[in-house]
Amino acid sequence: MPESNERREQRLAKLMLLRQLGLDPYPARVSYSHTCAQALAAFEASPEENQPVQVVGRLMAIRDMGKSTFCHIADGTGRLQIYLRQNDLGEEGYTLFHKAMDVGDFIQVEGHLFRTRTGEITVHAVAWRPLAKALLPLPDKWHGLRDVETRYRQRYLDLLSNPEVREIFIRRARLITAIRRFFDAQGFLEVETPILQPLYGGAAARPFTTYHNALDRTLYLRISDELYLKRLIIGGFDRVYEIGHDFRNEGISTRHNPEFTVLEAYQAYADYHDVMRLVERLYETISQEVMGGLTITYQGNTIDLTPPWRRITMRDAILEHSGIDILEYADYASLWAAVQAKGLDLPPQRNWGKLVEKLFEECVEPTLIQPTFILDYPVEISPLAKKKPEDPRLVERFEFFIGAMECGNAFTELNDPLDQRERFVAQGRASQAGDEEAHPMDEDFITAMEHGMPPTGGLGIGIDRLVMLFTDQSSIREVILFPQLRGEE
RNA sequence: GAGCCGUUAGCUCAGUCGGAAGAGCCCCUGCCUUUUAAGCAGGUUGUCGCGCGUUCGAGUCGCGCACGGCUCACCA
Protein backbone atom coordinates (compact mmCIF):
# COMPACT_ATOMS: atom_id res chain seq x y z
CA MET A 1 0.00 0.00 0.00
CA PRO A 2 1.96 3.04 -1.21
CA GLU A 3 0.98 5.41 1.54
CA SER A 4 1.61 9.05 0.94
CA ASN A 5 2.53 10.89 4.07
CA GLU A 6 4.75 13.65 5.17
CA ARG A 7 7.58 11.43 6.35
CA ARG A 8 7.67 9.62 3.05
CA GLU A 9 7.70 12.95 1.18
CA GLN A 10 10.68 14.08 3.27
CA ARG A 11 12.59 10.96 2.39
CA LEU A 12 11.67 11.26 -1.27
CA ALA A 13 13.09 14.77 -1.22
CA LYS A 14 16.32 13.40 0.24
CA LEU A 15 16.43 10.79 -2.49
CA MET A 16 16.07 13.53 -5.12
CA LEU A 17 18.84 15.49 -3.45
CA LEU A 18 21.20 12.52 -3.77
CA ARG A 19 20.29 12.19 -7.44
CA GLN A 20 20.86 15.90 -8.07
CA LEU A 21 24.34 15.60 -6.61
CA GLY A 22 25.10 12.66 -8.88
CA LEU A 23 24.89 10.01 -6.17
CA ASP A 24 22.80 7.00 -7.22
CA PRO A 25 20.48 6.18 -4.29
CA TYR A 26 20.19 2.59 -5.59
CA PRO A 27 23.56 1.63 -7.08
CA ALA A 28 23.79 -1.77 -8.74
CA ARG A 29 27.30 -2.56 -7.53
CA VAL A 30 28.48 -2.93 -3.96
CA SER A 31 31.85 -3.72 -2.50
CA TYR A 32 33.06 -4.39 1.01
CA SER A 33 36.13 -5.81 2.64
CA HIS A 34 34.57 -7.01 5.91
CA THR A 35 31.14 -7.90 7.23
CA CYS A 36 30.27 -6.16 10.49
CA ALA A 37 31.25 -9.25 12.46
CA GLN A 38 34.48 -9.65 10.49
CA ALA A 39 35.45 -6.03 11.11
CA LEU A 40 34.99 -6.49 14.86
CA ALA A 41 36.91 -9.76 14.76
CA ALA A 42 39.72 -8.23 12.71
CA PHE A 43 40.29 -5.55 15.31
CA GLU A 44 40.08 -8.04 18.18
CA ALA A 45 42.66 -10.20 16.42
CA SER A 46 45.13 -7.39 15.78
CA PRO A 47 44.13 -4.29 17.65
CA GLU A 48 46.42 -1.80 15.96
CA GLU A 49 44.53 1.22 14.76
CA ASN A 50 44.38 2.44 11.15
CA GLN A 51 43.42 -0.92 9.62
CA PRO A 52 41.52 0.09 6.50
CA VAL A 53 38.07 -1.43 6.06
CA GLN A 54 35.10 -1.03 3.81
CA VAL A 55 31.78 -2.04 5.38
CA VAL A 56 28.13 -2.06 4.34
CA GLY A 57 24.84 -2.25 6.18
CA ARG A 58 21.61 -0.63 7.24
CA LEU A 59 21.73 2.51 9.35
CA MET A 60 20.14 1.58 12.67
CA ALA A 61 20.93 4.62 14.79
CA ILE A 62 22.34 8.09 14.22
CA ARG A 63 23.71 10.17 17.10
CA ASP A 64 24.46 13.62 15.78
CA MET A 65 26.82 15.66 17.94
CA GLY A 66 27.30 18.63 15.68
CA LYS A 67 30.57 18.38 13.81
CA SER A 68 30.83 14.68 14.52
CA THR A 69 28.34 11.85 14.48
CA PHE A 70 28.15 8.29 15.69
CA CYS A 71 26.03 5.74 13.85
CA HIS A 72 25.37 2.06 14.04
CA ILE A 73 25.01 0.01 10.92
CA ALA A 74 23.82 -3.59 10.85
CA ASP A 75 24.18 -6.39 8.36
CA GLY A 76 23.14 -10.00 8.81
CA THR A 77 26.18 -10.68 10.98
CA GLY A 78 25.76 -7.96 13.56
CA ARG A 79 26.07 -4.28 14.40
CA LEU A 80 29.03 -2.00 13.95
CA GLN A 81 29.59 1.57 15.07
CA ILE A 82 30.63 4.23 12.56
CA TYR A 83 32.27 7.53 13.48
CA LEU A 84 31.79 10.39 11.04
CA ARG A 85 33.74 13.61 11.55
CA GLN A 86 33.50 16.78 9.51
CA ASN A 87 37.31 17.15 9.48
CA ASP A 88 37.66 13.78 7.75
CA LEU A 89 34.73 13.92 5.36
CA GLY A 90 34.86 17.57 4.42
CA GLU A 91 31.96 19.90 5.07
CA GLU A 92 30.07 18.79 1.95
CA GLY A 93 30.32 15.07 2.57
CA TYR A 94 29.52 15.48 6.22
CA THR A 95 26.56 17.79 5.70
CA LEU A 96 25.16 15.68 2.90
CA PHE A 97 25.09 12.68 5.20
CA HIS A 98 22.79 14.58 7.55
CA LYS A 99 20.72 16.12 4.80
CA ALA A 100 20.16 12.94 2.84
CA MET A 101 20.49 9.88 5.06
CA ASP A 102 18.04 8.38 7.56
CA VAL A 103 17.81 5.45 9.89
CA GLY A 104 16.75 2.53 7.71
CA ASP A 105 18.92 3.46 4.73
CA PHE A 106 21.68 1.20 3.49
CA ILE A 107 25.14 2.69 3.29
CA GLN A 108 28.71 1.84 2.41
CA VAL A 109 31.49 3.27 4.57
CA GLU A 110 35.23 3.33 4.11
CA GLY A 111 37.55 4.10 6.97
CA HIS A 112 39.82 2.58 9.55
CA LEU A 113 39.18 0.73 12.77
CA PHE A 114 39.77 2.20 16.19
CA ARG A 115 38.47 1.84 19.70
CA THR A 116 36.48 4.68 21.25
CA ARG A 117 36.95 6.11 24.71
CA THR A 118 34.16 3.85 25.93
CA GLY A 119 35.86 0.83 24.38
CA GLU A 120 33.68 0.15 21.36
CA ILE A 121 35.37 -0.98 18.16
CA THR A 122 34.37 1.57 15.54
CA VAL A 123 35.00 2.51 11.93
CA HIS A 124 36.42 6.00 11.62
CA ALA A 125 34.91 7.02 8.28
CA VAL A 126 36.81 8.75 5.49
CA ALA A 127 34.13 8.24 2.82
CA TRP A 128 30.56 7.01 2.51
CA ARG A 129 27.98 6.48 -0.19
CA PRO A 130 24.34 5.41 -0.24
CA LEU A 131 23.49 1.82 -1.17
CA ALA A 132 19.70 1.99 -0.92
CA LYS A 133 17.43 4.75 0.31
CA ALA A 134 14.45 3.73 2.45
CA LEU A 135 11.25 5.71 1.99
CA LEU A 136 9.41 4.42 5.03
CA PRO A 137 10.67 4.46 8.60
CA LEU A 138 11.55 1.47 10.74
CA PRO A 139 9.51 0.66 13.86
CA ASP A 140 10.24 2.31 17.18
CA LYS A 141 13.86 1.79 18.07
CA TRP A 142 13.48 0.45 21.56
CA HIS A 143 9.85 -0.50 22.04
CA GLY A 144 10.18 -2.48 18.85
CA LEU A 145 7.13 -3.64 16.97
CA ARG A 146 4.49 -5.03 19.33
CA ASP A 147 1.31 -5.04 17.27
CA VAL A 148 0.76 -8.73 16.58
CA GLU A 149 -1.10 -8.24 13.33
CA THR A 150 1.61 -6.00 11.88
CA ARG A 151 4.26 -8.44 13.10
CA TYR A 152 2.70 -11.22 11.01
CA ARG A 153 1.65 -9.16 8.00
CA GLN A 154 4.96 -7.27 7.78
CA ARG A 155 7.25 -9.93 9.18
CA TYR A 156 10.31 -8.12 7.79
CA LEU A 157 9.69 -5.34 10.31
CA ASP A 158 9.24 -7.89 13.08
CA LEU A 159 12.54 -9.54 12.18
CA LEU A 160 14.32 -6.19 12.07
CA SER A 161 13.10 -4.86 15.39
CA ASN A 162 12.64 -7.99 17.50
CA PRO A 163 15.87 -9.98 17.77
CA GLU A 164 14.16 -12.79 19.68
CA VAL A 165 11.91 -13.39 16.67
CA ARG A 166 14.94 -13.61 14.42
CA GLU A 167 16.40 -16.18 16.83
CA ILE A 168 13.28 -18.36 16.58
CA PHE A 169 13.65 -18.69 12.84
CA ILE A 170 17.38 -19.27 13.01
CA ARG A 171 16.73 -22.06 15.50
CA ARG A 172 13.99 -23.43 13.26
CA ALA A 173 16.46 -23.70 10.40
CA ARG A 174 19.03 -25.39 12.64
CA LEU A 175 16.47 -27.90 13.86
CA ILE A 176 15.47 -28.83 10.32
CA THR A 177 19.10 -29.12 9.29
CA ALA A 178 19.72 -31.39 12.29
CA ILE A 179 16.72 -33.54 11.37
CA ARG A 180 18.01 -33.94 7.81
CA ARG A 181 21.46 -34.80 9.06
CA PHE A 182 20.00 -37.41 11.41
CA PHE A 183 17.97 -39.19 8.74
CA ASP A 184 20.77 -38.98 6.19
CA ALA A 185 23.14 -40.54 8.72
CA GLN A 186 20.63 -43.35 9.35
CA GLY A 187 20.68 -44.22 5.65
CA PHE A 188 17.35 -42.61 4.71
CA LEU A 189 16.95 -41.16 1.23
CA GLU A 190 15.36 -37.73 1.04
CA VAL A 191 12.68 -37.64 -1.66
CA GLU A 192 10.03 -35.30 -3.00
CA THR A 193 6.52 -36.49 -3.80
CA PRO A 194 3.62 -34.67 -5.46
CA ILE A 195 1.89 -31.82 -3.73
CA LEU A 196 -0.75 -31.63 -6.46
CA GLN A 197 -2.52 -34.96 -6.30
CA PRO A 198 -5.41 -36.44 -8.30
CA LEU A 199 -6.61 -38.13 -5.11
CA TYR A 200 -5.78 -37.04 -1.59
CA GLY A 201 -5.14 -39.41 1.27
CA GLY A 202 -2.98 -40.55 4.15
CA ALA A 203 -4.85 -38.59 6.81
CA ALA A 204 -8.37 -37.72 7.92
CA ALA A 205 -8.81 -34.17 6.76
CA ARG A 206 -10.60 -32.04 4.25
CA PRO A 207 -8.40 -31.01 1.31
CA PHE A 208 -7.97 -27.85 -0.71
CA THR A 209 -9.28 -28.37 -4.22
CA THR A 210 -7.77 -26.87 -7.32
CA TYR A 211 -8.05 -27.31 -11.05
CA HIS A 212 -5.61 -28.05 -13.85
CA ASN A 213 -6.73 -26.33 -17.06
CA ALA A 214 -4.74 -28.31 -19.64
CA LEU A 215 -5.63 -31.66 -18.08
CA ASP A 216 -9.18 -30.49 -17.45
CA ARG A 217 -9.32 -32.14 -14.08
CA THR A 218 -9.65 -31.46 -10.39
CA LEU A 219 -6.51 -31.80 -8.32
CA TYR A 220 -6.04 -31.67 -4.57
CA LEU A 221 -3.28 -30.19 -2.45
CA ARG A 222 -1.89 -33.06 -0.45
CA ILE A 223 -3.06 -33.62 3.11
CA SER A 224 -0.17 -36.01 3.74
CA ASP A 225 2.83 -37.57 1.99
CA GLU A 226 2.07 -41.07 3.16
CA LEU A 227 0.68 -42.93 0.17
CA TYR A 228 3.42 -41.80 -2.22
CA LEU A 229 6.20 -42.56 0.24
CA LYS A 230 4.82 -46.07 0.69
CA ARG A 231 4.88 -46.49 -3.10
CA LEU A 232 8.61 -45.76 -2.85
CA ILE A 233 9.02 -48.44 -0.19
CA ILE A 234 7.25 -50.80 -2.57
CA GLY A 235 9.65 -49.55 -5.25
CA GLY A 236 12.65 -50.72 -3.28
CA PHE A 237 13.86 -47.62 -1.47
CA ASP A 238 14.04 -49.20 1.98
CA ARG A 239 14.41 -45.95 3.90
CA VAL A 240 12.85 -42.72 2.65
CA TYR A 241 11.89 -39.43 4.19
CA GLU A 242 10.38 -36.17 3.05
CA ILE A 243 10.16 -32.76 4.65
CA GLY A 244 7.52 -30.60 3.03
CA HIS A 245 4.20 -28.87 3.30
CA ASP A 246 0.80 -30.44 3.77
CA PHE A 247 -2.44 -28.51 3.37
CA ARG A 248 -5.63 -29.03 5.31
CA ASN A 249 -8.81 -27.09 4.73
CA GLU A 250 -9.68 -26.65 8.38
CA GLY A 251 -9.92 -24.04 11.08
CA ILE A 252 -7.01 -21.87 12.12
CA SER A 253 -5.83 -21.90 15.72
CA THR A 254 -2.74 -21.47 17.83
CA ARG A 255 -1.82 -25.05 16.88
CA HIS A 256 -3.15 -25.20 13.32
CA ASN A 257 -2.09 -23.39 10.18
CA PRO A 258 -3.73 -24.49 6.92
CA GLU A 259 -0.29 -24.95 5.38
CA PHE A 260 2.22 -26.66 7.64
CA THR A 261 5.51 -28.48 7.54
CA VAL A 262 5.65 -32.21 8.02
CA LEU A 263 8.38 -34.80 8.23
CA GLU A 264 7.41 -38.29 7.14
CA ALA A 265 9.80 -41.22 7.25
CA TYR A 266 9.35 -44.87 6.27
CA GLN A 267 11.64 -47.75 7.10
CA ALA A 268 11.25 -51.20 5.58
CA TYR A 269 11.67 -54.26 7.80
CA ALA A 270 10.73 -52.27 10.88
CA ASP A 271 7.68 -52.07 13.14
CA TYR A 272 6.31 -49.37 15.44
CA HIS A 273 8.64 -50.40 18.27
CA ASP A 274 11.60 -49.70 16.00
CA VAL A 275 10.04 -46.36 15.10
CA MET A 276 9.71 -45.42 18.79
CA ARG A 277 13.43 -45.93 19.23
CA LEU A 278 14.02 -43.90 16.06
CA VAL A 279 11.94 -41.03 17.46
CA GLU A 280 13.81 -41.09 20.76
CA ARG A 281 17.16 -40.99 19.00
CA LEU A 282 15.96 -38.23 16.69
CA TYR A 283 14.91 -35.94 19.55
CA GLU A 284 18.02 -36.83 21.54
CA THR A 285 20.25 -35.96 18.59
CA ILE A 286 18.66 -32.71 17.54
CA SER A 287 18.23 -31.48 21.11
CA GLN A 288 21.87 -32.17 21.80
CA GLU A 289 22.93 -30.44 18.58
CA VAL A 290 20.69 -27.40 18.72
CA MET A 291 19.99 -26.92 22.45
CA GLY A 292 23.24 -28.38 23.79
CA GLY A 293 21.44 -30.77 26.14
CA LEU A 294 18.39 -32.93 26.71
CA THR A 295 16.49 -30.68 29.10
CA ILE A 296 14.20 -28.01 27.69
CA THR A 297 11.61 -25.68 29.13
CA TYR A 298 8.20 -25.51 27.54
CA GLN A 299 5.54 -23.12 28.86
CA GLY A 300 6.90 -23.28 32.37
CA ASN A 301 7.47 -27.06 32.43
CA THR A 302 10.90 -28.61 32.51
CA ILE A 303 10.99 -31.45 30.02
CA ASP A 304 13.56 -34.21 29.94
CA LEU A 305 14.05 -35.76 26.53
CA THR A 306 16.45 -38.46 27.72
CA PRO A 307 15.46 -41.88 26.32
CA PRO A 308 13.76 -44.16 26.92
CA TRP A 309 10.45 -42.32 27.07
CA ARG A 310 7.41 -43.61 28.89
CA ARG A 311 5.35 -46.08 26.87
CA ILE A 312 1.73 -46.74 27.79
CA THR A 313 -1.17 -48.14 25.84
CA MET A 314 -4.11 -45.92 25.11
CA ARG A 315 -6.28 -48.39 27.06
CA ASP A 316 -4.13 -48.15 30.20
CA ALA A 317 -3.78 -44.37 29.90
CA ILE A 318 -7.55 -43.90 29.71
CA LEU A 319 -8.11 -46.39 32.53
CA GLU A 320 -5.61 -44.53 34.70
CA HIS A 321 -7.22 -41.11 34.18
CA SER A 322 -10.92 -41.93 33.85
CA GLY A 323 -11.36 -45.34 35.42
CA ILE A 324 -12.93 -46.61 32.20
CA ASP A 325 -11.55 -49.75 30.56
CA ILE A 326 -12.35 -49.23 26.91
CA LEU A 327 -11.95 -52.93 26.12
CA GLU A 328 -14.69 -53.80 28.59
CA TYR A 329 -17.05 -51.52 26.68
CA ALA A 330 -16.22 -52.68 23.19
CA ASP A 331 -19.16 -51.16 21.38
CA TYR A 332 -20.22 -47.57 21.04
CA ALA A 333 -23.41 -47.80 23.09
CA SER A 334 -21.86 -49.40 26.15
CA LEU A 335 -18.81 -47.10 26.10
CA TRP A 336 -21.07 -44.08 25.73
CA ALA A 337 -23.08 -45.27 28.74
CA ALA A 338 -19.87 -45.69 30.74
CA VAL A 339 -18.75 -42.19 29.81
CA GLN A 340 -22.12 -40.79 30.85
CA ALA A 341 -22.04 -42.77 34.10
CA LYS A 342 -18.72 -41.09 34.94
CA GLY A 343 -20.34 -37.72 34.36
CA LEU A 344 -17.91 -36.83 31.60
CA ASP A 345 -19.16 -34.12 29.29
CA LEU A 346 -18.18 -35.34 25.82
CA PRO A 347 -19.97 -34.69 22.53
CA PRO A 348 -21.40 -37.81 20.86
CA GLN A 349 -19.11 -39.40 18.26
CA ARG A 350 -19.55 -41.35 15.05
CA ASN A 351 -18.23 -44.67 16.30
CA TRP A 352 -16.45 -46.50 19.11
CA GLY A 353 -12.98 -45.56 17.85
CA LYS A 354 -13.72 -41.87 17.69
CA LEU A 355 -15.25 -41.93 21.15
CA VAL A 356 -12.15 -43.62 22.52
CA GLU A 357 -10.04 -40.96 20.92
CA LYS A 358 -12.19 -38.13 22.28
CA LEU A 359 -12.10 -39.67 25.73
CA PHE A 360 -8.32 -39.83 25.48
CA GLU A 361 -8.02 -36.22 24.33
CA GLU A 362 -10.17 -35.00 27.20
CA CYS A 363 -8.83 -37.08 30.06
CA VAL A 364 -5.26 -37.94 29.22
CA GLU A 365 -3.72 -35.58 26.70
CA PRO A 366 -3.45 -32.51 28.98
CA THR A 367 -1.43 -34.57 31.48
CA LEU A 368 1.25 -35.68 29.02
CA ILE A 369 3.96 -33.16 29.82
CA GLN A 370 6.99 -35.46 29.79
CA PRO A 371 7.64 -37.32 26.53
CA THR A 372 5.20 -40.20 26.28
CA PHE A 373 4.33 -42.76 23.63
CA ILE A 374 0.66 -43.68 23.56
CA LEU A 375 0.27 -47.11 21.94
CA ASP A 376 -2.46 -49.07 20.18
CA TYR A 377 -5.26 -47.05 18.64
CA PRO A 378 -8.75 -48.12 17.55
CA VAL A 379 -8.82 -49.60 14.05
CA GLU A 380 -11.70 -47.35 12.89
CA ILE A 381 -9.59 -44.22 13.13
CA SER A 382 -6.44 -45.80 11.65
CA PRO A 383 -7.21 -47.16 8.15
CA LEU A 384 -3.57 -47.37 7.10
CA ALA A 385 -2.12 -49.17 10.14
CA LYS A 386 -1.65 -52.89 10.73
CA LYS A 387 -3.96 -54.61 13.20
CA LYS A 388 -2.55 -56.00 16.40
CA PRO A 389 -2.25 -59.76 15.90
CA GLU A 390 -3.82 -60.43 19.31
CA ASP A 391 -6.68 -57.91 19.08
CA PRO A 392 -8.14 -56.83 15.72
CA ARG A 393 -10.02 -53.93 17.34
CA LEU A 394 -6.70 -52.15 17.75
CA VAL A 395 -3.80 -51.31 15.47
CA GLU A 396 -0.07 -51.03 16.03
CA ARG A 397 -0.01 -47.30 16.11
CA PHE A 398 1.45 -44.72 18.47
CA GLU A 399 1.35 -41.00 18.89
CA PHE A 400 3.82 -39.21 21.09
CA PHE A 401 3.17 -36.23 23.29
CA ILE A 402 5.50 -33.65 24.77
CA GLY A 403 4.32 -30.64 26.75
CA ALA A 404 0.70 -31.86 26.38
CA MET A 405 1.07 -31.40 22.64
CA GLU A 406 0.64 -34.12 20.05
CA CYS A 407 4.00 -34.18 18.32
CA GLY A 408 3.84 -37.11 15.96
CA ASN A 409 2.07 -40.19 14.71
CA ALA A 410 3.43 -43.54 13.62
CA PHE A 411 2.47 -47.08 12.89
CA THR A 412 3.41 -50.48 11.71
CA GLU A 413 2.18 -49.91 8.19
CA LEU A 414 -0.62 -51.99 6.79
CA ASN A 415 0.90 -54.01 3.92
CA ASP A 416 -1.91 -56.54 3.38
CA PRO A 417 -3.69 -55.32 0.21
CA LEU A 418 -6.85 -57.31 0.97
CA ASP A 419 -7.17 -55.78 4.43
CA GLN A 420 -6.32 -52.36 2.98
CA ARG A 421 -9.20 -52.67 0.53
CA GLU A 422 -11.58 -53.60 3.35
CA ARG A 423 -10.44 -50.57 5.35
CA PHE A 424 -11.07 -48.25 2.43
CA VAL A 425 -14.49 -49.80 1.94
CA ALA A 426 -15.25 -49.16 5.61
CA GLN A 427 -14.08 -45.56 5.14
CA GLY A 428 -16.42 -45.34 2.17
CA ARG A 429 -19.31 -46.35 4.42
CA ALA A 430 -18.30 -43.65 6.91
CA SER A 431 -18.22 -41.15 4.08
CA GLN A 432 -21.71 -42.22 3.02
CA ALA A 433 -22.80 -41.66 6.61
CA GLY A 434 -21.57 -38.07 6.36
CA ASP A 435 -17.98 -38.24 7.63
CA GLU A 436 -16.32 -35.53 5.55
CA GLU A 437 -12.89 -36.65 6.62
CA ALA A 438 -13.21 -40.29 5.71
CA HIS A 439 -10.35 -41.66 3.64
CA PRO A 440 -11.23 -42.05 -0.07
CA MET A 441 -10.77 -45.36 -1.88
CA ASP A 442 -7.41 -45.35 -3.68
CA GLU A 443 -7.29 -48.18 -6.24
CA ASP A 444 -3.92 -47.09 -7.58
CA PHE A 445 -2.42 -47.36 -4.10
CA ILE A 446 -3.93 -50.82 -3.59
CA THR A 447 -2.53 -51.92 -6.94
CA ALA A 448 0.90 -50.80 -5.77
CA MET A 449 0.48 -52.77 -2.55
CA GLU A 450 -0.67 -55.86 -4.46
CA HIS A 451 2.76 -55.95 -6.09
CA GLY A 452 4.17 -56.61 -2.63
CA MET A 453 5.07 -54.24 0.19
CA PRO A 454 7.61 -55.20 2.85
CA PRO A 455 6.78 -54.90 6.54
CA THR A 456 7.37 -51.23 7.23
CA GLY A 457 7.39 -48.75 10.06
CA GLY A 458 6.21 -45.22 9.25
CA LEU A 459 6.40 -41.91 11.06
CA GLY A 460 4.96 -38.41 10.71
CA ILE A 461 6.10 -35.43 12.76
CA GLY A 462 4.66 -31.92 12.66
CA ILE A 463 7.73 -29.77 12.27
CA ASP A 464 6.02 -26.54 13.32
CA ARG A 465 5.02 -28.08 16.64
CA LEU A 466 8.52 -29.45 17.06
CA VAL A 467 9.86 -25.93 16.58
CA MET A 468 7.27 -24.59 19.05
CA LEU A 469 8.57 -27.08 21.61
CA PHE A 470 12.22 -26.14 21.13
CA THR A 471 11.55 -22.38 21.06
CA ASP A 472 9.01 -22.36 23.92
CA GLN A 473 6.25 -20.82 21.82
CA SER A 474 2.57 -21.43 22.48
CA SER A 475 1.31 -20.26 19.07
CA ILE A 476 2.17 -21.90 15.76
CA ARG A 477 2.11 -18.44 14.16
CA GLU A 478 5.26 -17.56 16.07
CA VAL A 479 7.22 -20.29 14.29
CA ILE A 480 5.82 -19.81 10.77
CA LEU A 481 7.29 -16.80 8.99
CA PHE A 482 4.12 -15.86 7.15
CA PRO A 483 1.15 -17.47 8.91
CA GLN A 484 -2.21 -17.52 7.21
CA LEU A 485 -4.37 -14.50 8.11
CA ARG A 486 -7.62 -13.17 6.79
CA GLY A 487 -7.34 -10.81 3.87
CA GLU A 488 -7.13 -7.11 4.59
CA GLU A 489 -9.65 -4.50 3.37
C1' G B 1 -18.76 -21.36 13.87
C1' A B 2 -19.40 -19.26 19.45
C1' G B 3 -17.81 -16.26 23.68
C1' C B 4 -14.56 -12.60 25.72
C1' C B 5 -10.95 -8.73 24.82
C1' G B 6 -8.68 -5.27 21.55
C1' U B 7 -8.20 -1.43 17.22
C1' U B 8 -6.28 6.45 19.27
C1' A B 9 0.08 10.13 15.54
C1' G B 10 5.07 6.54 11.52
C1' C B 11 6.17 3.27 16.42
C1' U B 12 4.91 2.24 21.83
C1' C B 13 0.88 3.72 24.60
C1' A B 14 -2.45 7.12 28.03
C1' G B 15 -7.26 9.33 27.46
C1' U B 16 -11.36 10.07 34.16
C1' C B 17 -18.40 11.05 34.48
C1' G B 18 -20.31 12.08 27.34
C1' G B 19 -17.89 18.52 27.32
C1' A B 20 -11.27 22.03 23.38
C1' A B 21 -7.44 14.66 21.02
C1' G B 22 -2.44 13.73 24.60
C1' A B 23 2.79 11.66 26.21
C1' G B 24 7.51 9.37 24.94
C1' C B 25 10.18 7.96 20.70
C1' C B 26 10.45 9.13 15.45
C1' C B 27 10.50 13.48 12.22
C1' C B 28 11.82 18.99 11.27
C1' U B 29 14.89 23.63 12.99
C1' G B 30 19.02 25.47 16.01
C1' C B 31 23.45 24.39 19.43
C1' C B 32 27.03 20.67 20.48
C1' U B 33 34.12 17.08 17.21
C1' U B 34 34.53 10.05 21.50
C1' U B 35 28.54 9.26 21.57
C1' U B 36 25.71 4.81 22.36
C1' A B 37 17.93 5.08 24.74
C1' A B 38 23.75 11.01 23.55
C1' G B 39 22.24 15.84 25.54
C1' C B 40 19.92 20.95 25.45
C1' A B 41 16.15 24.52 23.21
C1' G B 42 12.02 25.02 19.92
C1' G B 43 8.36 22.92 16.36
C1' U B 44 5.03 19.55 13.20
C1' U B 45 1.80 15.18 13.30
C1' G B 46 -4.69 12.33 13.72
C1' U B 47 -10.55 9.34 8.75
C1' C B 48 -9.68 8.00 17.39
C1' G B 49 -10.63 0.57 12.45
C1' C B 50 -15.41 1.33 9.14
C1' G B 51 -20.77 2.42 9.03
C1' C B 52 -25.36 3.63 11.31
C1' G B 53 -27.78 5.39 15.66
C1' U B 54 -28.67 8.01 20.66
C1' U B 55 -27.40 13.05 22.25
C1' C B 56 -27.12 20.16 22.27
C1' G B 57 -22.41 17.48 22.04
C1' A B 58 -19.45 10.70 20.94
C1' G B 59 -12.43 8.53 21.09
C1' U B 60 -15.99 7.60 25.29
C1' C B 61 -22.87 5.05 25.05
C1' G B 62 -25.91 1.44 21.61
C1' C B 63 -26.28 -1.63 17.06
C1' G B 64 -23.90 -3.71 12.72
C1' C B 65 -19.41 -4.84 10.02
C1' A B 66 -13.95 -5.63 9.30
C1' C B 67 -9.34 -7.17 11.18
C1' G B 68 -6.45 -9.16 15.25
C1' G B 69 -5.64 -11.83 20.04
C1' C B 70 -7.22 -15.51 23.66
C1' U B 71 -10.54 -19.52 24.96
C1' C B 72 -13.80 -23.10 23.03
C1' A B 73 -15.65 -25.82 18.82
C1' C B 74 -13.39 -27.96 14.52
C1' C B 75 -8.78 -30.55 13.65
C1' A B 76 -5.62 -38.21 14.04
Image: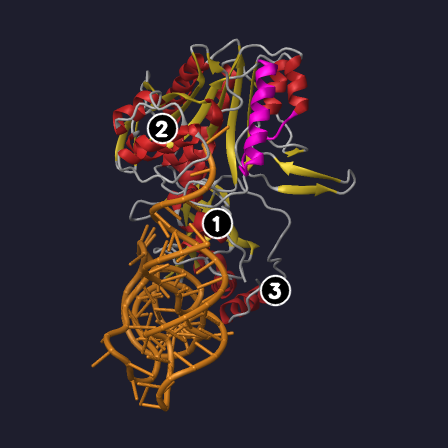
Amino acid on which the number 2 mark rests in the picture: Ser
Q: Which residue is drawn at 53% across and 30% down?
A: A203
- For residue A212, what is the image quadrant? top right
Which range is magenta? A416-442
Q: How crowded is mark 3: few (under 14 residues within 10 Å), some or many (20 or more)?
A: few
**Residue toward you, A162 or A320:** A320
Provide the chain ID for the residue under circle 3. Answer: A
Real-space Cα distance between discs 1 and 2?
52 Å
Mark count: 3
Q: In the displayed structure, does residue A489 sit left or right of residue A81? A: right
Q: What residue is pinned by disc 3?
A: A21
Give residue A155's mark. 1
Q: What residue is pinned by disc 2?
A: A334
Amino acid on which the number 3 mark rests in the picture: Leu
Residue B2, percent across and down? Answer: 40, 56
Magenta span contains residue A441: yes
SS state under label 3: loop
The reply to whether discs 2 and 3 touch (Cβ–Cβ < 8 Å) is no
Name the mark nearer the viewer: 1 or 2. 2
SS state under label 2: helix
Name the mark nearer the viewer: 2 or 3. 2
Q: Which residue is drawn at 64% across and 37% down?
A: A220
Residue A177, percent across and down? Answer: 49, 27
Magenta span contains residue A284: no
A134 to A212, vertically: above or below:
below
A263 to A16, vertically: above or below:
above
Quadrant in which the N terminus of chain A appears: bottom right
**Residue toward you, B3 or A438:** A438
Residue A423, percent across and down? Answer: 56, 22
